[in-house]
Image (cartoon, coloured by chain):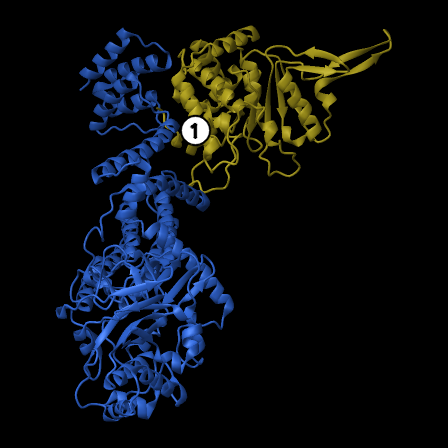
């Protein structure tokens, strides 16, 4: 087959494909890497456009070494997700600077395919999937252009062929997607840095920590209720429960204490729901207060926070149910109550004095709780995302001086006051509320919905939820954070309602994304097994799965190759096989038949190249043409031809 | 058979210098019972070639110079009232011959052109309800200036298809041209040619050409060619079944001229430029500088 070398048209396709691939990556590349890649691509195009010679090896070699060194210095190593992907991208672009031949172009296209796949190490959203498809399509069209034997092709023909090729690949992709045995977690270890940049509730609470989280518009989790969701004021998503206060930050109870799990009495009918949680790199699983039926593969702590067995590094999906009407631990363990009275000795004297004054007036614990809430409600406390920094005695400073705070300030100081007044109390962090997406009827809970509230233990009632923030800013609890915050507060755009059109578009997109998560990304080992077992009618082992995959892919492959073979009438019969051995013998002597060359012309050419064997070649050619084109094929002539070709040296 | 065809070719070669391939193509076209279109610039020897062929084949020859005021009756003939016998008497036009040379066919009006093309298709003339059969063999050699010349009515594609072959003559090579310039030129030599064959002999040759063996393997190749033109984006339209038949007939004639009693892919490739050149229009897609017919040959594999 005649193979042409790539021309400017092919180069344009290739550059377009590589630009699309790079566009998937550039935003997370180090600045200098992104810049170098862009400069190199533009440089290569300009060189070709003005027909300038390519840079010599003496320029490229130092550049390559510099690029490698740069990565080494930026990431202190060449391994790890970011470093290796950037190295690949840089080297591929440098290869572009010396790409001239068809072979170079092939290498670049295949490198481009690989670089496209690495996008999945960073994100798996559907939008990126679509962009990757576009990049793959463009690269395939490039491949069509450089593989077609005959000159230039119109661009639409190239695009059409690429589309057909991708469409032919789709059934194989589907079969592999459904059948390729899934393993829990990634197939190979994803480097450590792949987990950075996940946000979520921390296990501790310090003033300012939650308000920082609130600045993020990222989605924490999505909830699909069976039936009607509870009203927003009831939507308390329980996360870490914090017992211990060291004067600055609140932390969880140590599991070493081995406290008994608190008893839970529930009334009424449960709310059932399914949560799709984004990776948080922590093990806390968010459930509605109070969880009565736990998700699979989870454990519950003494204070009823639900934990996954390992930190959540991939999107997970779990079902659970909760009762909104409950009594928690009316018979609490005395040691647990003791622990929830702990405050550091001798700090925040003003607050202690205030609490002591309540106790001294002989108030019951219920009254003390109400008094504290009344204080928040009636005195001039302000709910704000930008609280001032607090001094050495944070609770005193907040309650008597600044009086401006976010939920963690209110929850923290409230619990402090309760403990100082001898009422067992603790801080609960989690999320409050959420936004109902009318498209698809599910709840979106964002990092900006992060919240902290308090639980106090009252005789006969057990642990009761008290939300001091509700006393300061009732609308935060009823209508969500965007109504509670004046506009000058730096809330993420999407947590605001001021742009209804954008909001609506966003909700539609999020519904699509949710479906993508459900049907594509969450197709994990368990769901694969369920799906295939339901097809097979019995439980499948992974060996059976592997066999099914091979059979399915093989069947698709055979189906496709049937069409390919059918279109190509080169089904060789016996005569052609015999003649083919003759062709092979001549090929070894360096005489190759062109596909379009007839046997007579070829025989003529061969005998001119090998004058000493001209007679033999003529005889074979003559016999072959007679047999093939004159239908003079008999057993004798076949044997004769075989013998002639066999003795042809 | 080969002797006869070779004699014909040799005789023609003595008049038309250095155009062996074109003479062979023209002869193949005639042996395949087709009409021939010769297209080239004025003065390239189109008319001489047509005249020579008629002479060598020993056929009755008439020539019509096509002009813009030529009427169909000028070719076909007219009925004139005979006063003596009181009847209309048909005066046959120049078309009643063996070889009709339609010179500069693209200068006539479409009406006259279609009259000619109808005759070419039917092999008979119907005037005033009376059908008159043309003598056998009958074929038309039309010459045409390239269409971009002023004052022409280019033949539409559908009518080009009626011509089995279209050939171009091209400039002669240096030696032939020197010979031509030394002598007085070809035209007066034409009259001196002794025919190599007569009309009955030509008909026998034509029948023999039809008997040339065409194997399935060759038909596979032919169909691959047709299929390629239909699926490739480089051509506006693919080749018609009529073009396929034309290819087969010409390949048979060519094989006979080569002295074989069976046709080979090489025969198809040899006649392909003549048969396909005027039926295949490039879609304007880049050809890499390759002639569309050459591209076609290069693209279809001989299995």
Q: Colour of chain B?
A: yellow
The answer to whether A410 appears left or right of B95 in the picture is left
**A624 up-or-down from A120: above or below:** above
In the rendered image, the residue lying farthest to the left is A256
Residue lying at 73% horizontally and 25% vertically, measured from the top left = B71
State the count of labels. 1
Quarter of the figure with residue B21? top left
Residue B141: x %, y % from top left:
59, 22
**A535 up-or-down from B72: above or below:** below
In this rendered view, identify the residue nearer to me: A457 or A16.
Answer: A457
The answer to whether B152 appears left or right of A197 in the picture is right
| The chain in blue | A
- Report whether residue B192 is seen: no
Quarter of the figure with residue B259? top left
- Mark 1 = which residue? B175
Q: Badge 1: how crowded within 10 Å, few (<14), some, or many (20+)?
A: few
Residue A332: x %, y % from top left:
22, 71
Residue A17: x %, y % from top left:
36, 53
Residue A201: x %, y % from top left:
28, 70
Quarter of the figure with residue A119? bottom left
Quadrant of the drawing holding the C terminus of chain A:
top left
- Report whether residue A181 is seen: yes
Residue lying at 35% horizontally and 60% vertically, measured from the top left = A23
In this rendered view, identify the residue nearer to me: A528 or B15.
Answer: A528
In this rendered view, identify the residue nearer to me: B232 or B90.
Answer: B232
Q: Pointer 1 indicates a residue of which chain?
A: B
In this rendered view, identify the residue nearer to me: A383 or A235.
Answer: A235
Q: Helix, strand, or loop for circle 1?
A: helix
Residue lying at 28% horizontally and 62% vertically, measured from the top left = A279
């Amino acid at each position: 087959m005649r193979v042409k070398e790539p021309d400017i048209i092919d180069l344009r396709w290739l550059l377009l494909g590589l630009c699309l691939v790079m566009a998937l990556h550039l935003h997370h590349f180090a600045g200098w890497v992104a810049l170098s890649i862009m400069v190199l691509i533009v440089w290569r195009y300009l060189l070709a456009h003005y027909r300038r010679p390519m840079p010599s090896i003496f320029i490229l070699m130092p550049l390559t070494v510099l690029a490698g060194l740069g990565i080494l210095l930026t990431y202190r190593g060449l391994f790890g997700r970011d470093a290796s992907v950037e190295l690949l991208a840089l080297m591929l672009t440098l290869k572009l600077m010396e790409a001239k031949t068809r072979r170079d172009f092939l290498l670049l296209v295949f490198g481009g395919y690989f670089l496209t796949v690495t996008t999945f190490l960073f994100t798996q959203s559907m939008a990126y999937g679509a962009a990757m498809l576009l990049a793959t399509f463009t690269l395939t069209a490039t491949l069509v252009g450089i593989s077609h034997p005959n000159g230039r092709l119109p661009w639409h023909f190239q695009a059409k062929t690429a589309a057909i090729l991708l469409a032919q690949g789709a059934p194989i992709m589907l079969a592999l997607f459904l059948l390729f045995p899934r393993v829990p977690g990634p197939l190979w270890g994803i480097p450590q840095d792949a987990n950075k940049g996940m946000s979520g509730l921390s296990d501790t609470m310090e003033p300012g920590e939650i308000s920082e989280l609130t600045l993020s518009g990222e989605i924490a989790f999505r909830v699909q209720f069976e039936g009607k969701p509870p009203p927003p004021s009831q939507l308390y998503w329980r996360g870490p429960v914090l017992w211990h206060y060291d004067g600055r930050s609140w932390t969880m109870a140590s599991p070493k204490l081995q406290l008994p799990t608190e008893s839970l009495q529930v009334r009424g009918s449960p709310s059932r729901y399914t949560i799709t949680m984004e990776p948080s790199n922590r093990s806390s699983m968010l459930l509605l207060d109070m969880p009565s039926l736990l998700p699979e593969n989870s454990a519950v702590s003494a204070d009823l926070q639900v934990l996954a067995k390992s930190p959540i590094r991939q999107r997970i999906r779990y079902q659970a149910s909760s009762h909104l009407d409950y009594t928690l631990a009316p018979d609490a363990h005395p040691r647990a109550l003791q622990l929830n009275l702990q405050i550091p000795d001798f700090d925040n004297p003003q607050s202690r004095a205030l609490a002591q004054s309540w106790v001294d007036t002989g108030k019951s614990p219920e009254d003390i709780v109400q008094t504290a809430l009344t204080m928040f409600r009636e005195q001039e406390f302000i709910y704000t995302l930008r609280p001032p920094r607090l001094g050495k005695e944070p609770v005193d400073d907040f309650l008597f001086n600044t009086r401006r705070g976010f939920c963690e300030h209110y929850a923290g100081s409230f619990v402090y006051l309760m403990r100082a007044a001898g009422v067992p109390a603790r801080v609960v962090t989690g999320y409050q509320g959420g936004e109902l997406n009318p498209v698809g009827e599910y709840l979106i809970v964002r990092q900006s919905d992060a919240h902290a509230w308090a639980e106090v233990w009252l005789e006969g009632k057990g642990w009761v939820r008290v939300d001091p923030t509700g006393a300061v800013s009732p609308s935060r609890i009823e209508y969500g954070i965007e109504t509670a915050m004046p506009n000058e507060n730096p809330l993420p755009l999407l947590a605001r309602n001021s742009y209804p059109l954008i909001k609506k578009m966003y909700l539609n997109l999020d519904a699509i994304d949710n479906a993508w998560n459900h049907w594509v990304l969450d197709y994990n080992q368990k769901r694969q097994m369920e799906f295939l077992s339901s097809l097979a009618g019995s439980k499948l082992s992974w060996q059976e799965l592997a066999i099914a995959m091979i059979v399915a892919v093989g069947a698709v492959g055979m189906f496709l190759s049937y069409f390919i073979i059918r279109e190509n009438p080169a089904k060789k019969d016996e005569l052609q096989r015999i003649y083919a051995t003759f062709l092979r013998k001549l090929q070894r002597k360096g005489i190759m038949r062109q596909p379009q060359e007839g046997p007579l012309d070829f025989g003529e050419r061969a005998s001119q190249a090998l004058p000493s064997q001209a007679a033999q070649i003529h005889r074979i050619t003559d016999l072959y043409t007679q047999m093939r084109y004159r239908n003079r094929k008999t057993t004798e002539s076949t044997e004769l031809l075989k013998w002639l070709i066999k003795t042809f040296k | 058979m080969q002797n006869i065809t070779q004699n014909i070719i040799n005789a023609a070669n003595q008049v038309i210098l250095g155009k062996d391939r074109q003479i062979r193509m023209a002869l193949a076209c005639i042996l395949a019972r087709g009409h021939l279109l010769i297209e080239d610039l004025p003065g390239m020897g189109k008319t001489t070639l047509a005249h020579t062929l008629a002479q060598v084949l020993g056929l009755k020859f008439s020539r019509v110079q096509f002009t813009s005021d030529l009427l169909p009756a000028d070719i076909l003939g007219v009925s004139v009232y005979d006063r003596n016998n009181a009847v209309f008497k048909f005066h046959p036009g120049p078309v009643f011959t063996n070889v009709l040379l339609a010179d500069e066919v693209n200068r006539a009006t479409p009406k006259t052109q279609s009259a000619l093309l109808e005759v070419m298709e039917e092999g008979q003339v119907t005037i005033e309800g009376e059908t008159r059969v043309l003598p056998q063999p009958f074929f038309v050699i039309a010459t045409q200036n390239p269409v971009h010349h002023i004052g022409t009515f280019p033949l539409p594609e559908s009518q080009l298809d009626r011509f089995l072959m279209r050939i171009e003559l091209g400039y002669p090579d240096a030696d032939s041209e020197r010979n031509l310039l030394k002598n007085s030129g070809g035209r007066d030599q034409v009259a001196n040619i002794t025919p190599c064959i007569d009309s009955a002999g030509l008909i026998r040759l034509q029948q023999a050409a039809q008997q040339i063996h065409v194997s399935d393997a060759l038909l596979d190749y032919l169909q691959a060619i047709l299929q390629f033109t239909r699926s490739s984006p480089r051509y506006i339209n693919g080749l018609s079944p009529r073009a396929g038949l034309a290819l087969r007939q010409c390949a048979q004639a060519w094989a006979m001229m080569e002295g074989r009693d069976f046709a080979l892919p090489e025969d198809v490739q040899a006649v392909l430029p003549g048969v396909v050149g005027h039926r295949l229009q490039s879609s304007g897609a880049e050809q890499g500088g390759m002639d569309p017919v050459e591209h076609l040959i290069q693209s279809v594999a001989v299995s």
